[in-house]
Image (cartoon, rainbow, N blue to C red):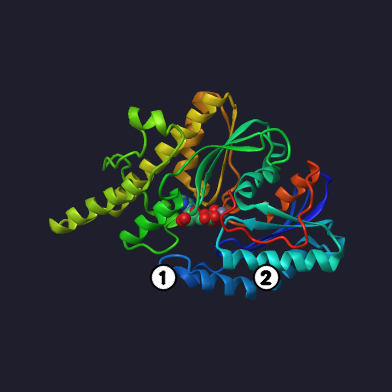
Amino acid sequence: MSGPLVLGIESSCDETGVGIVRGHELLANEVASSVDLHARFGGVVPEIASRAHLEAMLPTLERACAKADVDLTEIDAVAVTAGPGLMGALVVGVAAAKALAFALGKPLYGVNHLAGHVAVDLLEHGPLPTPCVALLVSGGHTSLLLVDDIAGVRGRGIVELGATIDDAAGEAYDKVARLLGLPYPGGPVIDRAATGDPRAIAFPRGLTTRRDLEKHRFDFSFSGLKTAVARWVETRERDGLDVPLADVAASFQEAVCDVLSAKALAACAATGATNLLIGGGVAANGRLRALLAERADAAGVTLRTPRPGLCTDNGAMIAVLGAEVIDAGGRPSAPDLGADSGLP
Ligand code: KG4
Ligand code: ZN
């Protein structure tokens, strides 16, 4: 596979990622995570994340070049997450990318982190049949997108069909894990703990009543679910009963995955898209992948799921998105590119 040799830098949250791709071919994907430093606070502490990015950036860059067996001077372009994310974390990556592009005399492409979560699939499954529907489920975002052009250059680009009106799916996992006394990040922990009966407790499915669907057909809500789990646990404890972790985790997880998969397939039906792609940290979830596979199959929709290691934040997703922007004829960013924590 040919294409431009692009180095991608990611630093929007708690992972410092440097990836190198040639077109759709993955050459290196090195990630340094500060997740352990945040664990005792139950969530990401922005100042700690920024400092960790500063410390990890150059060693991660060096590891990526060594892994790809690439000399920096061979790179055709530098891509970087310009937003959305934590401001203090983003600026570290943007500063590093600008310095690198300037020193090498190569073009710089500031790209959208969320589009990167979708684009990463190209590394595994090749060109994206468009239009397709993408279900983006991370710690900070949950949305359903109609993707015409992942580079955002041609046609309608990326259209948001719906999004969460309160907590993101990953945030719900993290908060519920916390109230169950489980460590951060809660997603993978609940995924593993959910060995019980998913029908043991009937937790609410947000925004799925007929009335809700009229206004919020493709939107999500997870804060009511989180409160329902908290109430259920409180009541058990007040009554002196044990909390069956495996059942609570499985029932909570089922409520999240049921709504995510039902709305994703409804979006495919409504738009006529026959390909559904999932991305973001929660896309690594075993139950979500299984339920989507089952429902996509029944609906005649092709499901594209990147391997779990590519679903969480990494530099390769930014590099491949940069390669797509170049391929689509997108213009490089100005040398004074800034980070935008609220990038839509
Ligand atoms: O995309 P990501 O790495 O970072 C953001 O951009 O937010 O997503 C992190 C989120 C966290 O909330 C984490 O708990 C969740 O993804 N997550 C999972 C799993 N692995 C990570 N949630 C459910 N099941 C998993 N296996
Ligand atoms: Zn992310």
Q: Amino acid at mark 2?
A: Met
Q: Amino acid at mark 1?
A: Phe
Nearer the observer, 111 or 69: 111
Nearer the observer, 250 or 220: 220
Mark 1 to mark 2 CA distance (whole Å): 23 Å
Residue on which disc 2 sits = 57
Q: Mark 2 or mark 1, which is nearer the start of the sequence? A: 1
Q: Is 48 rendered above or below residue 140? A: below
Nearer the observer, 99 or 171: 99
At horizontal 58% and vertical 41% (from top left) the residue drawn is: 305
Q: Is 71 rendered above or below residue 219? A: below
Question: Is 77 placed left or right of 149 in the picture?
Answer: right
Q: Secondary structure at mark 1?
A: loop
Residue 66 visible somewhere in the drawing: no
At horizontal 51% and vertical 69% (from top left) the residue drawn is: 46
- As drawn, the label of residue 41 is 1
- As drawn, the label of residue 52 is none
Nearer the observer, 85 or 180: 85
Question: Is 202 placed left or right of 335 in the picture?
Answer: left
At horizontal 85% and vertical 65% (from top left) the residue drawn is: 104
Question: Is 280 placed left or right of 101 in the picture?
Answer: left
Q: Secondary structure at mark 2?
A: helix
Residue 206 visible somewhere in the drawing: yes
